[in-house]
Amino acid sequence: MSEAVASLRPSIEWSMDNDDVENITWHTKGAEPLTTAEVEAEVKRLETVEADKIKADQAATAAAIAHAKSLGFTDAMIAVMYPNLGA
């Protein structure tokens, strides 16, 4: 929840007890409070963004492996050159 609050109020100082939106103390004067629904929606949005990033990274990895193979590289060669690629 704290990531979502920080995302929604990036320049506001606050603290939260027990990861509970109802227990946020706003330290910046004039900070507009958040509702639980707003925070939960942001949690879902951030989860979607992370899932999309993982999918994009996996697609880029697959494309890189396919390209290397199209150039004649074997799985063993790819593994040696790019051990973190996971050929």
Image: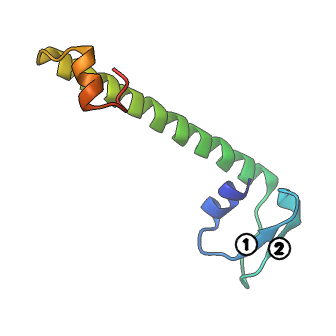
Quadrant the C terminus occupies: top left
Check disc 2: other Cα within 10 Å, few if <14, some if 14-19, many if 20+: some
In this rendering, position of residue 1 left or right of residue 51: right
Closer to the eye: label 1 or 2: 2
Quarter assignment of residue 77 = top left
The residue at the point 11 percent across, 18 percent down is 71
In this rendering, position of residue 25 left or right of residue 67: right
- Whether 71 is drawn above or below 64: the answer is above
Mark on residue 32? 1
Going by the picture, which residue comes out furthest to the bottom?
A: 29
The residue at the point 19 percent across, 22 percent down is 67
Task: Provide residue 70's location: percent of width, then percent of height.
Answer: 15, 15
Dot 1 amino acid type = Glu
The residue at the point 32 percent across, 22 percent down is 62
Mark on residue 25? 2
Q: Secondary structure at mark 1?
A: loop
* 48 and 41: which is toward the camera: 48
* 83 and 62: which is toward the camera: 83
How was the colour assigned to the protein in this rendering?
Answer: rainbow
In this rendering, position of residue 49 left or right of residue 38: left
- Whether 43 is drawn above or below 12: the answer is above
Check disc 1: other Cα within 10 Å, few if <14, some if 14-19, many if 20+: few
Task: Provide residue 14's location: percent of width, then percent of height.
Answer: 74, 73
- Whether 53 is drawn above or below 7: the answer is above
The residue at the point 69 percent across, 77 percent down is 13
Task: Provide residue 35's location: percent of width, then percent of height.
Answer: 79, 58
* 36 and 78: which is toward the camera: 78
- Whether 10 is drawn above or below 20: the answer is below
* Badge 1 or badge 2: first in the primary sequence: 2
Dot 2 amino acid type = Thr
* 77 and 70: which is toward the camera: 77
